[in-house]
Amino acid sequence: MDMGITRVEKNMFSQNTDEIASELVQSLSNSDNSILLFKVLALAVKNNAEFVRSLDESIFEDADIFREKYVTLLKHALSQAVDVPTGIRDSGVPSIEAVSSYTPKELSVFFGVSITTIFNWIDQGRFMGIQRAGSNKHNLIPDVTTYVYGSGKRTTIKEIVTMWKKEEAEHPSTVEVSDLDYHTGQIALYEDKYKGEFERTLGTKLNLTPEEETDAQVWKHHLGRQRLGFKDTEK
């Protein structure tokens, strides 16, 4: 008789994934066995290459991050075990194959800051579970990564990218403009959205929503680039 996973078992595993991951991280005979099992599963499960590329040994140094990665891996293993057809996703069982990863350069565009700032945020632990790659490697940061705002609030890179794409779709650029005109135009959009200049709106608020904090970062970026543009025109 072939062994399979019933719908009840699938739902039970999906509901208990956090508990199972915690047990795997904490309750095996020693931490080396837990790490070894994680590595074997990560490399053995199908359609998992993108997830594996996003990992490094640093995830084993923090139990919370390790457990979070175990949860992701176990949910993906479940989706493969029940053989979900391509293009169809079970509710609550995300496919790692669908995870997108971004370079620091790409993230600098989505966050509206410099690449140097992105690397500084990596060093500061603002991208949870991510460390700067070695000299012969390049950082690829999955969109499921949690980003921690300066205020302590959290969101995912995927949500940041979604907001950026929404903004781009609402205000598409169809005419070739200079850098100065572009940044001035973007500043005008934010001034219209918040009904005033940065210093009188978001710049005065202490508690920002995740959307406002993202807007504030991008807005300040455009203001800085506008100032540089004015300096260039004066030379």
Image: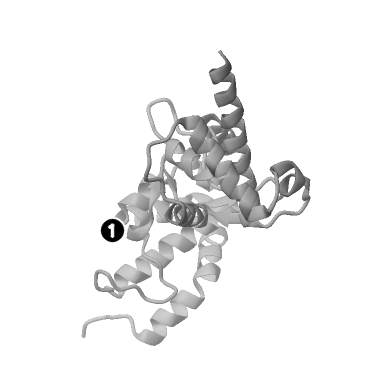
For this rendering, which residue is in front, 184 or 101?
A: 184
Residue extending farthest to the left is 1
Residue at image position (59%, 20%) is 231
Residue at image position (24%, 73%) is 85
Count of picture labels? 1
Q: Is residue 47 left or right of residue 231?
A: left
In percent of width and height, residue 186 lies at 54, 43
Q: Amino acid at mark 1?
A: Asn
In percent of width and height, residue 128 lies at 57, 48
Q: Is residue 154 left or right of residue 60?
A: right
Residue at image position (56%, 64%) is 22
Q: Is residue 90 left or right of residue 63?
A: left
| Residue 103 in the image: above or below residue 38 | above
In percent of width and height, residue 218 lies at 58, 43
The residue wearing badge 1 is 47
**Colouring style:** one colour
For this rendering, which residue is in front, 95 or 28?
A: 95
